């Protein structure tokens, strides 16, 4: 694997997201020229990547943004023809599982058919480019074996997961049918301070910090017993890059090999703030209490999924053995990193609200 890649061109869809921002930083540090695909919006603020492309920023001359959308094939053809990328990382999607139940058609179009549009653009204009598809552990759904590996059968339990399965199979088909260097990274849950606030981990750490400062009274969650394999997004983008440096394209699982419950995530988050939790009740009536016996965590059935995924646990041994990828940040370190970042944000909010 080459550590420095001067003059190589990378194209990232979903560059404004958590993974896209970490990946852009990584590739720029390795010497790539990076193009990020963005959709037009009414605001120009993109907080996860603003530090990369503002005038005077490090690497700003090698980081460019282009307008496009996975729902618009013509824009994808235009971008591929203009950029002529060596590597393409498709990280764009409607990626929220719960939202996919409310918007199944949109999710299928962007998360599933969007991959077909992008692969066709590459096949037509840049077939030698190396293509990475962001697949998801949610594809395993109602798991048939534990831990889950590259050979585990998929059983998706949401429109999002079903769309990801379509994209996975299509990527593999383009590899086998056309000889393209196209592969899937099956990533288990990976989090960071840049995670969207509507994802459960960030919802927990943000609420815990705000409760600590008196800015919020309570955190309401769904299934506290759901088990996930949580890692740090900054580690996982390194794995994405390593996949595209391999001599032969193949699909890999990235995971920590450790599973923890939503309940335990809460416990670590509140403990980091000096607010150890005790639990009372069960099921819909379970509550988390602080030392003053205040209910700071409560179960709300509105947050249950129509079809729950109870346990996800990945087997990363193949990525470790063949790619040399090993995650560096453990579960507790991840929670503490996120809590500390959200506490700083909450303190800034409190300071602003206190000003006359």
Image (tube, grey):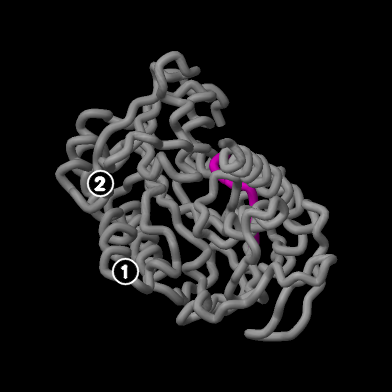
Residue beneath disc 1: 103
Question: What residue is shown at x 50% (from left), y 67% (from top)?
Answer: 138
Name the residue located 35 percent from the left edge and 60 percent from the top edge.
167
As drawn, is 106 to the left or to the right of 274? left
Stretch of the chain drawn in magenta: 229-239
Q: Quadrant of the N terminus?
A: top right
| Magenta segment includes 236 | yes
Q: Is residue 316 visible?
A: no
Magenta span: chief secondary structure? helix
Q: Quadrant of the C terminus?
A: top right
Q: Residue at x 46, y 19 (%)?
A: 59
The alpha-carbon separation of the residues under discs 2 and 1 comes to: 17 Å
Depth check: give the residue in front, 167 or 311: 311
- Please state which of residues 278 and 247 is positioned toward the viewer in this rendering: 278
Nearest the eye: 88 or 216: 216
Residue that badge 2 annotates? 69
| In magenta segment, residue 276 | no
Q: Is residue 283 left or right of residue 99?
A: right
> Which quarter of the figure has residue 135?
bottom left
Q: Is residue 36 visible?
A: yes
Q: Residue furthest front?
A: 356
State whether residue 223 is above or below residue 82. Answer: below
Where residue 269 sits in the image (x, y, percent)?
A: 73, 56
């Amino acid at each position: 694997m080459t550590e420095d890649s001067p003059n190589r061109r990378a194209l990232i869809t979903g560059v404004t997201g958590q993974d896209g921002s970490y990946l852009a930083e990584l590739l720029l540090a390795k010497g790539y020229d990076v193009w990020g695909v963005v959709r037009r919006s009414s605001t120009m603020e993109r907080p996860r990547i603003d530090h990369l492309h503002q005038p005077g920023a490090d690497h700003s001359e090698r980081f460019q943004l282009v307008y496009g959308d996975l729902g618009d094939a013509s824009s994808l053809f235009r971008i591929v023809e203009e950029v002529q990328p060596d590597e393409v990382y498709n990280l764009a999607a409607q990626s929220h599982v719960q939202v996919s139940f409310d918007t199944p058609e949109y999710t299928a179009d962007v998360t599933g058919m969007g991959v077909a549009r992008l692969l066709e653009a590459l096949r037509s204009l840049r077939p030698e480019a190396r293509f990475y598809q962001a697949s998801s552990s949610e594809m395993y759904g109602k798991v048939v074996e534990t831990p889950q590996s590259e050979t585990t059968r998929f059983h998706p339990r949401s429109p999002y997961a079903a769309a990801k399965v379509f994209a996975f199979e299509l990527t593999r088909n383009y590899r086998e049918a056309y000889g393209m260097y196209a592969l899937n990274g099956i990533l288990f849950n990976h989090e960071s301070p840049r995670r969207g606030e509507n994802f459960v981990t960030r919802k927990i750490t943000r609420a815990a910090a705000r409760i600590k400062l008196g800015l919020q009274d309570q955190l309401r969650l769904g299934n506290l017993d759901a088990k996930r394999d949580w890692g740090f997004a900054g580690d996982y983008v390194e794995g994405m890059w390593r996949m595209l440096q391999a001599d032969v394209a193949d699909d890999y699982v990235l995971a920590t090999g450790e599973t923890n419950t939503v309940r335990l995530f809460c416990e670590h988050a509140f403990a980091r703030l000096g607010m150890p939790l005790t639990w009372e009740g069960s099921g819909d009536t379970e509550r988390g209490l602080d030392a003053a016996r205040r209910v700071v965590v409560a179960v709300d059935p509105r947050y249950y999924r129509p079809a729950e995924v109870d346990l996800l646990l990945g087997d990363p041994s193949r990525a470790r053995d063949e790619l040399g990828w090993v995650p560096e940040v453990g579960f507790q370190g991840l929670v503490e990193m996120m809590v500390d970042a959200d506490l700083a944000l909450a303190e800034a909010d409190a300071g602003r609200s206190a000003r006359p």
